[in-house]
Amino acid sequence: MRHPSIRLKKFKMWLLVLNESAGKGKALHLANQFSQLLSNSKQEFTLIHETSYEKTIERLKASLSTNSYKKVIAIGGDGLVNLCLQYLAQSGTVLGVIPAGTGNDFARAVGVNKMSVTEIFNLYTKSDPAEIDLGLVKSESSQKWFVQVLSTGFDAEVNSRANKIKWPRGKSKYTIATVKTLARFKPIKYEIEIDTHKFDQSAMLFTIANGETYGGGMRICPGASNSDGYFEILLVRPVSRLVLLTIFPKVFKGNHIPHKKIDTYRAKVVKISAPTSSYADGEYVANLPITVTNVGRALSTWLAP
């Protein structure tokens, strides 16, 4: 018989984190669907539904500090997934996603981007999670995780500009940001160390990929895998604006490689220094210099068959 002074900890199991603005309100509808499925199956959950980024972080940290949750579901886009990563990496707590954002590249990587809420629910409740690799970025003042792609140079500047555009929303703002960035962009001189190989190189962009896609399915590093312990790295050497403009549309299908101005590498640790910033999973990470390390089996998540 259990001693009366001992209490067994009760796990609520599910923590749902919602970005209400994602998908023009689509996220809230999906959250209601998933919540109903949990209720119907008598599973306890908590929904974090705040109106500001700061309050979402506050509640996420407070909820996870109780150790009451085994599964966290991000209902939104890659930005929300990236936020959750910062608190779930190497924790053993499982992170799932119900895609409702613009890009949904993490959902694409784990195979749930085209699944219905019911199909996702069945996957998350009936299958065992797997462990995948993450990227860890260390700068002079911070440390951050990412799951898909870290970029610097041209595409990072496009990302920065797009994040400031309030209208139009969705992918159209990235088209506008690309055109505006292209008009003024000049190659950046990098100091690079890929594992033990050091060199200097001017480049249009320098990308470190843990997964194949970013920007809503752009296959920037075809063949990148989140389960092999390595990054795929892509460097575009200085080219004219016209050539860069012809390269970018090919990225959606991964047809930009091979190209005489594109170099590719494979590594576990990358150090880069340049007068520019870095973005990962669509979010600002840090100004360079940074060190980026592939950390194996750092995130527990579900993979669709």
Image (cartoon, rainbow, N blue to C red):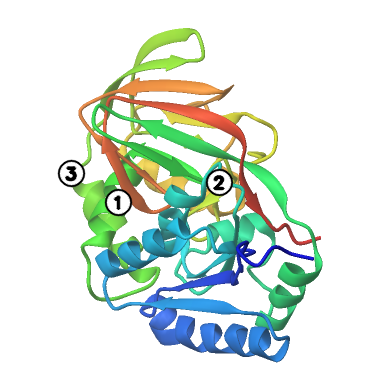
**Between marks 2 and 1, how big is the CA–CA gap?**
33 Å
Q: Which of labels 2 and 1 is toward the front?
A: 2
Residue holding disc 2: 91
Placement of 47 over or under 134, stated as above or below = below
Q: Earlier in the sequence, mark 3 or mark 1?
A: 1
Query: Quarter holding the N terminus?
Result: bottom right
Residue 158's mark? Answer: 1
Q: Earlier in the sequence, mark 2 or mark 3?
A: 2
Dot 2 lies on which element? loop
Residue at 58% across, 85% down: 35
**Between marks 2 and 3, how big is the CA–CA gap?**
43 Å
Looking at the picture, tell me which residue is in the foreground, 238 or 27: 27
Looking at the picture, tell me which residue is in the foreground, 269 or 204: 269
Q: Which of labels 3 and 1 is toward the front?
A: 1
Residue 14's mark? Answer: none
Residue holding disc 3: 184
Q: How crowded is mark 1: few (under 14 residues within 10 Å), some or many (20 or more)?
A: many
Q: Which of labels 2 and 3 is toward the front?
A: 2
Q: Earlier in the sequence, mark 2 or mark 1?
A: 2
Placement of 39 over or under 168, stated as above or below = below
Q: Is residue 221 left or right of residue 153?
A: right
Quadrant in the picture for residue 125: bottom right
Query: Quarter holding the C terminus?
Result: bottom right
Name the residue type under label 3. Arg
Dot 3 lies on which element? helix
Quadrant in the picture for residue 268: top right
Q: Exactly how many numbered labels are in the figure?
A: 3
Name the residue type under label 2. Ser
